[in-house]
Image (cartoon, rainbow, N blue to C red):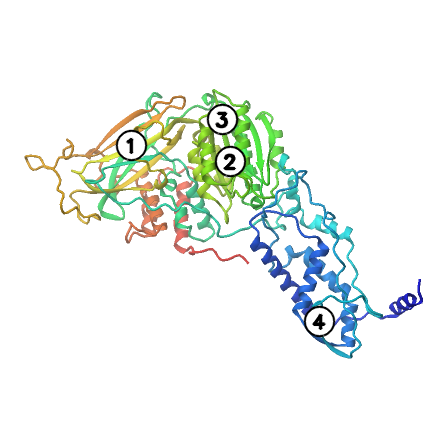
Amino acid sequence: MTDELEKLKAAFRQERASDPDPEARHAAIHAAMLQFEELEQEKNVAADQGSAAEDRLKTRASEISARILRRFSMTMTRSRLSYILAGGVSLAALVLVVNLNSQNLPGLPPQHGDREQAAPAGGGLLSLNSAKPEAPAPVVEEQSSPEVSYDVAAEPAPAPASGAIAPMAAAPSMAAKRMADGRTRTMAQTRAPQSVGGLVPYSNLAGTDDSTPGYQDQGRDRFSNVPDNPVKRVADDPVSTFSADVDTASYAFVRGSLNRGVLPPKDAVRIEEMVNYFDYDYPVPADRSQPFKADVSIMPTPWNAETRLMRIGIKGYEIERAEAPKANLVFLIDTSGSMNAPDKLPLLRQAFRMLVSNLRPDDVVSIVTYAGSAGTVLEPTKVSETGKIFAALDNLSAGGSTAGGEGIRQAYQLAGEHIDKTGINRVILATDGDFNVGISDPEQLKDFVERKRETGVTLSVLGFGRGNYNDLLMQELAQNGNGNASYIDTLSEARKVLVDEASSTLFPIAKDVKFQVEFNPAEVSEYRLIGYETRTLQREDFNNDKVDAGDIGAGHTVTALYEFRPSSATGALIEPLRYQTEAKSDTGDKTVTGYKTGEIAFLKIRYKLPDEDVSKLITTPIGADAVKAEISEASNDTRFAAAVAGFGEILKGGKYTGSYSLDDVLALAASARGNDPYNYRGSFLELVRLAKSAGAMEPLKK
């Protein structure tokens, strides 16, 4: 050991520890927090969703400290410089602490981001020592000048001179331990092997610990932008054709928005799904040779005295639980990073627990998960082995990007390998819908699902979460997969969809159900179908058995509403053409294609039985006997459906409702609440009240 080194060691031992300057310390802490927030914002802007491997701790600390010091050019004396250099270890420790505990600092954003990086094939935590060693941090040389202006770290510094002390390097083992302990739930644990769904203890699941912020996004929800059905003139276009729809996702999403004090996006409001969220007491057919029969009622339109509201309703017959076919279900569960939130994966697990508890012991359940890749977590297992199924659900964790297309492919493959020709074979996809890896093109996915339904495997979709909820894709997948689309925002909604309505959701009694209404120009001048914009069909599609349509489950109700203007009413929205006249009989009475005054419309319903490929037809003439002169004379079901439709119209902008207000909706709905054992209609009244004070946009998260 050289004499110079011995002298340096002796000088170091004699050096008195200096108390840091309070102002310098405060400025350094403030600058560190500001700079770290800036770095994190830059990182999050570039990220999509989920989890990704972080830079090495030493690299991040060096980068942050260098950028902080570059930000503040300081003029200092030799003595002040000595204080700073002597406090180098403290500054390095400060940067290290800020880096490790940034998630717990007030005002700093949570660390997340779903980068387009798949998990390693072997899964697990990315090794903290796998990156290349970093070069030592630059050291500032003490200058001989008594007072100089420094831009610290602006350029590489030479080796330390006599009397200068280099910052102490943090111990890698301690840094690794703190990172593993402090960030396992939000980042690293999500890298567990995807082939087994990323299994971790239930107590450590993302989103289950209040101290660990889950993945949050905002303003990226996607909905289909389809124009409202237009008003049509009966003389020009007397026939309306659409597919049955029993989805309810829109109502639950609207409810979730209003419960947060925010009005939903207009495209999120699908009026037919809001109306069909509620059950109605329509007559059930006497025998099963015809699975349902039509019930029609007409009353004055609540928001327009010149028009009438026609309500068409059907209800499928009920089946006894013991008579239900066996179920072969594949749970396809999104475990990507975007599912790392309390209202996503944790809620999803509890929802599927409810469903499994409601199945029969000989029903079969499988689980496929997908994130950066897809894999089978649970091979086909009888429900009698409930503990095994629950364990697989409880051990799911979220992390990685979203290879949803690959997950769908594997789920269908698994369902096909264990298909039950006499039972129900269904894939139940649970996701926020944000596919960003592999097959993500909606058209490709729709084509795949459409082809697979011919094999006897159908697809239902359960949506979770908000911020980046892809309703557009989920609706298209459910419609092409001959299944249902629901949105789960609470445990109560999970029970409604997966327990209370399980028979109507899982067990179809009719498929490819289509409606066609022909209006009589002698009685009706114009009409519009309220809702069903994504379900409209061409007139010729009605008789074409190759054209797919909606399915109806046991006990399910379907409600459709038309607003029409009687020929005798004034204020038509569409003026008659100048050069065309309506045909008249010799007596002067209007006659069109043989129908005389008195018959308002003619309803036709086509459907196929579940195991048949040729459709059957139900026809119902709609005459004056269906008309109620006053709103108060209509049934509770008709009036309540009208109130829900009016509410939806107002949320969409009130294009057709004029001065009709939320208070008017409340009054009508309250008068029509009727028998409400589960308080669904009572909860609707609360939603209308919330809408009166809801904001137009959710405040930006800090």
Marks 3 and 4, the one that precedes in the sequence: 4
Of marks 3 and 1, the one in the foreground: 1
Marks 3/1: CA–CA distance: 31 Å
Q: Which residue is denoted by mark 1 in the rendering?
A: 540
Report the amino acid beneath label 4.
Answer: Ala
- Counting residues from the start of the chain, the first of labels 2 and 4 encountered is 4
Task: Give the labeled residue for mark 4.
Answer: 24
Q: Amino acid at mark 3?
A: Asn
Of helix, strand and loop, which one carries label 4? helix
**Residue 155 appears in the figure:** yes
- The crowding category of the residue bearing disc 2, from other C-alpha atoms within 10 Å (few below 14, some 14 to 19, many at least 20), is many
Quadrant location of residue 240?
A: top left
Measured in 3D between alpha carbons, the distance from the residue under mark 1 to the one under mark 2, in whole angstroms, is 32 Å
Q: In the rendered image, which quarter is residue 285 located in?
A: top left
Q: What residue does disc 3 label? A: 425
Give the Cα distance between marks 2 and 3: 13 Å
Q: Which structural element holds mark 1?
A: helix
Q: Quadrant of the C terminus?
A: bottom right
Separation of marks 1 and 4 at Cα, in angstroms: 79 Å
What is the three-letter code of the residue carrying label 1?
Answer: Glu
Residue matched to label 2 = 429
Q: Earlier in the sequence, mark 3 or mark 1?
A: 3
| Left/right of residue 698 with respect to residue 640 in the rendered view | right
- In the rendered image, the quadrant that contains the N terminus is bottom right
